[in-house]
Amino acid sequence: MGKATRLTMLMLMIGLIALSGCASRKTGKKVDTLQAQVNAMTDELVRLDQSLQDTRAAVQAQEGGSGVSQSGAVSSGKGASVGGMYRTPSGFEVPSVNIQKALKKAGYYNGALDGKVGPGTRDAIAAFQKDNGLKADGVCGSGTWAKLKSYLESIK
């Protein structure tokens, strides 16, 4: 087989592969793999942030601190509540009191609507997550909020 014929056959095979979608399936799988890695790293970041905030809270308790870290964030676990806003390590934020209102309307939270995301609010978030097929980590991220906000918007 001559060089020109081999080149033609190669080009034909590349064209068939491209038309078959094989290359796009491989790309899709790679994107899915990368997304899974990003999600795993986000989970690890949340875990490390929780550990850091727990350590800060313990140090402040020993020193008789005010409950506010050097950054100004209230020590409240995996998400920090600052100025009425709840923020996750990934940067998602929502008003703290809205989380509590939605959890209360959904029947998961019985505490005060004080805008402070403490253990009671985190436990309510985790219970809501568990019942709604989400990772029950007690962090109100964008996925949890997407399901939870429907209760805030309801007329119950």
Image (tube, rainbow, N blue to C red):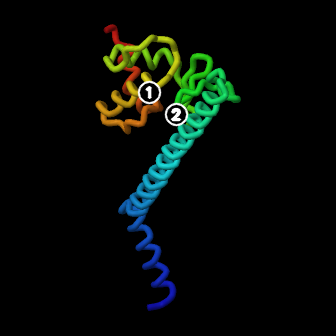
Residue 31: % across, % down: 46, 53
**Residue 93, located in which quarter of the rendered image?**
top right
Point out the tag, 1 or 2, that comes first from the N-terminus.
Answer: 2
Which one is nearer the viewer's eye here, 114 or 88? 114
| Residue drawn at 59 percent across, 33 percent down | 58
Q: Which residue is mark 1?
A: 122
Which one is nearer the viewer's eye here, 92 or 73? 73
- Give the alpha-carbon distance from disc 1 to disc 2, as whole Å: 9 Å
| Residue drawn at 52 percent across, 33 percent down | 78
Q: What amino acid is at disc 1?
A: Arg
Residue 28: % across, % down: 42, 55
Outermost top residue: 155
Q: Residues within 10 Å of mark 1 (few under 14, many from 20)?
A: many
Using residue 21 as the reference point, say whether residue 31 is left or right of it. right
Looking at the rendered image, the quarter that the C terminus falls into is top left
Which one is nearer the viewer's eye here, 150 or 54? 54
**Residue 65, located in which quarter of the rendered image?**
top right
Residue 112: % across, % down: 44, 11
